[in-house]
């Protein structure tokens, strides 16, 4: 449990950026983000992906704790601090079916959607990397079915008082 609590503190610390990070994101400039078609093979994130958007951000981060994801494993994870959402990029074609029946507060963006993604090293306030792929070719995607189960598990843990958020 101690390892899980450490991960929870690690991800929870990303809900509200520290002053330096916040200033960098707020003043990032016009080229800090880019609007791309979801799954666009010519974008900077990678080819063949869908986006799972989880609100609020703290809820999504709690699910990452349940999954035991580390911030240095190359999973493309984006925070939209302006809307308090976590965006998890997944392989194309699976997430929409997995999340068709919920849970609430989760939506899937597929090939007919557009998404604001970080451009450059960090991005900006509306789209900042929490965990960026090492390279496009080596991007590791979160499994949507595992993410859904982790969200449900995090909700149970929160209801039982095991998470502070």
Image (cartoon, rainbow, N blue to C red):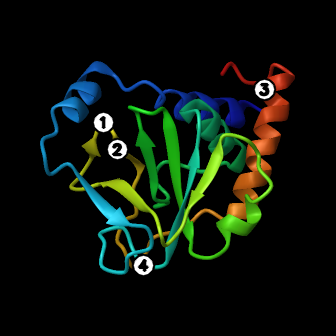
Quadrant, the C terminus: top right
Residues tagged 3 and 1 counted as in contact (Cβ below 8 A): no
Query: Observer-nearest residue: 5 or 28?
Result: 28
In the shown orientation, is residue 30 left or right of residue 124? left
In space, the residues marked 4 and 2 are separated at their CA atoms by 19 Å
Disc 1 is placed on an element classified as loop
Above or below — where is 25 with respect to 144? above
In the shown orientation, is residue 12 left or right of residue 119? right
Residues tagged 1 and 2 counted as in contact (Cβ below 8 A): yes
Quarter of image, res 29:
top left
* Residue to which mark 4 is pinned: 47
Quarter of image, res 155:
top right
* Residue to which mark 3 is pinned: 158
Residues tagged 3 and 2 counted as in contact (Cβ below 8 A): no
Circle 4 packing at 10 Å, graded few (<14), some (14-19), many (20+), is some
Q: Which disc number belongs to residue 125?
A: 1
Residue pictured at 82% horizontal, 30% vertical: 157
Residue pictured at 66% horizontal, 48% vertical: 68
In space, the residues marked 4 and 3 are separated at their CA atoms by 35 Å
* Residue to which mark 2 is pinned: 128
In space, the residues marked 3 and 2 are separated at their CA atoms by 26 Å
- For marks 1 and 4 on the same chain, the one whose residue lies earlier in the sequence: 4
Quadrant, the N terminus: top right
Above or below — where is 128 with respect to 99? above
Disc 4 is placed on an element classified as loop
Q: Residue 19: where, in percent of width, then height?
A: 28, 19
Residue pictured at 16% horizontal, 39% vertical: 28
């Amino acid at each position: 449990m101690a390892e899980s609590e450490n991960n929870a503190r690690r991800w929870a610390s990303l809900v509200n950026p520290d002053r330096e990070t916040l200033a960098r994101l707020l003043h990032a400039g016009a080229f800090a983000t880019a609007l791309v078609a979801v799954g666009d093979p010519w974008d900077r994130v990678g080819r063949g992906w869908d986006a799972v958007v989880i609100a609020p951000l703290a809820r999504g981060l709690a699910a990452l704790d349940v999954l035991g994801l580390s911030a240095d494993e190359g999973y493309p994870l984006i925070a939209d601090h302006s809307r308090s959402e976590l965006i998890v990029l997944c392989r194309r074609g699976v997430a929409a079916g997995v999340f068709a029946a919920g849970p609430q507060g989760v939506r899937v963006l597929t090939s007919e959607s557009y998404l604001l993604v970080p451009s450059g090293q960090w991005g900006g306030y509306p789209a900042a990397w929490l965990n960026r792929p090492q390279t496009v070719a080596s991007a590791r995607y979160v499994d949507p079915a595992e993410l859904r189960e982790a969200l449900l598990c995090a909700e149970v843990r929160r209801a039982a008082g095991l998470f502070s958020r």
